[in-house]
Every structure is written in structure tokens, then in C-alpha cells.
Image: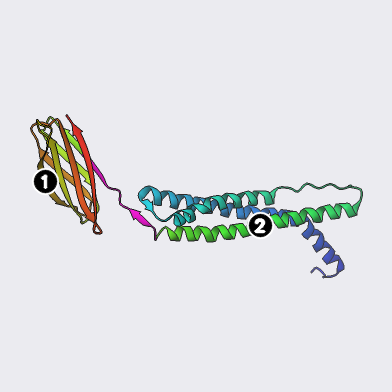
């Protein structure tokens, strides 16, 4: 059984001083790993969110979504800085100078570690806010229209992606010999859950030029897409 006396506390103090630098480095290394985990979580969530849906949000929301990038980089840099040795000058034959240099270096490392710790906390809060705000941003539906004429089957294929449940009015116009616009096809198609529009229109031959337009209403707002196809 070890006796708690002056010698015990001297030994404890010696051990604490020897481990003070290594403990700071170990703590900073843990913050570094946490920051890297934050970075992976943020980039994965943000990339998936943007690639699947085009985000349509106010500028302030987009800034908030992008702000963790700068802060996480800064946090990572301070985590590394907290683990780096501090330059010190002292006379190795004078104990007082050694002590002062050690205390000064430890003070610098403590300050760096404190900054890294607070930045990590702030990064976690900002990252949480950014990911939380992604659930409330408006996501724009990606609409598309494609027109292809298959000569071998004499079929004009009109396909596209549109909002589910909307009624899409597809119109096809061509130019006659007098270069006048003639509408020869109109079709109303209700988009199902798949969001796909697919029309196969028999056509013996493709006119000199045709224009295919798709029109629909989304939240009482009229929208449309058109494509031209030449012979």
C-alpha cells in the first residue's frame, strides 16, 4: 500500500508534468478524428442531397449549408496545430529557464487546444443546423422532354419527366409549304407516380421541321418545355 505523503505528491507532480504534453496531443488527436468524422458526414449528406434533388432555397440558406466547409477545415488545422511542438529557447544548464520554457510552451499548447475544442463544438452545432435545414429547403423537380423519330418503325417518340399527378398537354406543330405553323397533334396525358411521360405517335415521315411542346400547371403556375426536331 502506497503512503500518501510529500514524496507521493512529488512523484505525482513529476508524472503529471511528463504527461502534460502527451495528454494534450492525445486529446487533440481525438478532436482531429472527430472533425474528420464530421467532414465525412457533411460531405456525404450534402452531396447526396444535391445530386438527388436540385436545391432551390434563399441565398442565406445556401450560405448556411456551405458554411461548415470553411469551419471544418479551420477546426482540422487547429487540431493539427495543437499537436505540433512549440519552439522554445533555454539554457539546458539553468533549471529556471527550463521551467519557464516548459510552462510557456505548455501555455501555448493549452491555448491551441482550447481553440480547437471550441471550434469542434461550434462545428458540431453548425453542422447539425446545416443538415437540419436541408430537410426544409424547397426541392425543385427536374423536368425534361426528349423527342426522337424512329424511321424504321415510323414512330415519333415523345418522352420526359414531369411532376406526379399533373396533366401535361403535348402539342406538335410543323411548317407547311408556305412556312406556316400547322398544329397536327394534341394529347392530354396525366402523369402517374413514376413521373414519366411516354408517347408513341405513328408518323410515316418526318416533316421538314417540327416543334414538340409540353405544357402543364404546377401550383397554379403555368409551365412548359419545347423541343425542335429537323428532318
Circle 1 packing at 10 Å, graded few (<14), some (14-19), many (20+), is some
Res 186 label: 1
Q: Is 19 on the left-hand or right-hand side of 173?
A: right
Q: Would you place residue 128 above or below residue 48 in this image?
A: below
Q: List x then y, in percent, for residue 183.
A: 11, 41
Residue 127, compared with residue 80, is above or below; it is below
Task: Give left or right: position of 203 versus 41.
Answer: left
Question: Helix, strand, or loop for circle 2?
Answer: helix
Q: Which residues are magenta?
A: 136-146
Q: Nearer the viewer, residue 67 or 8?
A: 67
- Nearer the observer: mark 2 or 1; the answer is 1
The residue singled out by tag 2 in the image is 115
Observer able to see residue 23? no
The residue depicted at 38 percent of the width and 47 percent of the height is 51
In the image, residue 138 lies in the stretch drawn in magenta: yes
SS class, disc 1: strand
Amino acid at each position: 500500500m502506497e503512503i500518501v505523503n510529500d514524496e507521493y505528491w512529488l512523484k505525482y507532480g513529476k508524472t503529471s508534468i511528463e504527461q502534460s504534453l502527451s495528454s494534450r496531443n492525445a486529446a487533440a488527436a481525438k478532436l482531429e478524428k472527430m472533425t474528420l468524422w464530421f467532414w465525412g458526414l457533411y460531405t456525404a449528406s450534402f452531396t447526396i442531397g444535391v445530386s438527388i434533388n436540385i436545391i432551390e432555397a434563399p441565398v442565406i440558406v445556401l450560405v448556411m449549408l456551405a458554411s461548415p466547409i470553411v469551419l471544418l477545415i479551420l477546426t482540422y488545422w487547429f487540431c493539427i496545430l495543437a499537436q505540433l511542438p512549440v519552439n522554445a529557447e533555454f539554457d539546458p544548464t539553468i533549471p529556471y529557464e527550463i521551467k519557464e520554457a516548459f510552462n510557456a510552451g505548455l501555455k501555448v499548447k493549452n491555448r491551441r487546444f482550447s481553440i480547437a475544442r471550441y471550434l469542434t463544438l461550434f462545428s458540431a452545432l453548425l453542422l447539425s443546423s446545416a443538415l437540419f435545414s436541408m430537410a426544409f429547403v424547397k426541392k425543385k423537380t427536374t423536368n425534361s422532354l426528349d423527342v426522337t423519330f424512329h424511321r424504321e418503325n415510323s414512330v415519333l417518340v415523345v418522352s420526359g419527366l414531369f411532376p406526379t399527378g399533373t396533366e401535361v398537354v403535348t402539342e406538335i406543330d410543323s411548317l407547311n409549304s408556305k412556312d406556316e405553323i400547322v398544329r397536327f397533334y394534341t394529347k392530354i396525358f396525366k402523369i402517374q407516380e413514376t413521373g414519366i411521360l411516354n408517347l408513341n405517335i405513328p408518323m410515316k415521315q418526318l416533316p421538314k421541321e417540327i416543334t414538340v411542346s409540353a405544357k402543364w400547371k404546377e401550383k397554379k403556375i403555368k409551365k412548359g418545355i419545347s423541343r425542335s426536331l429537323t428532318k
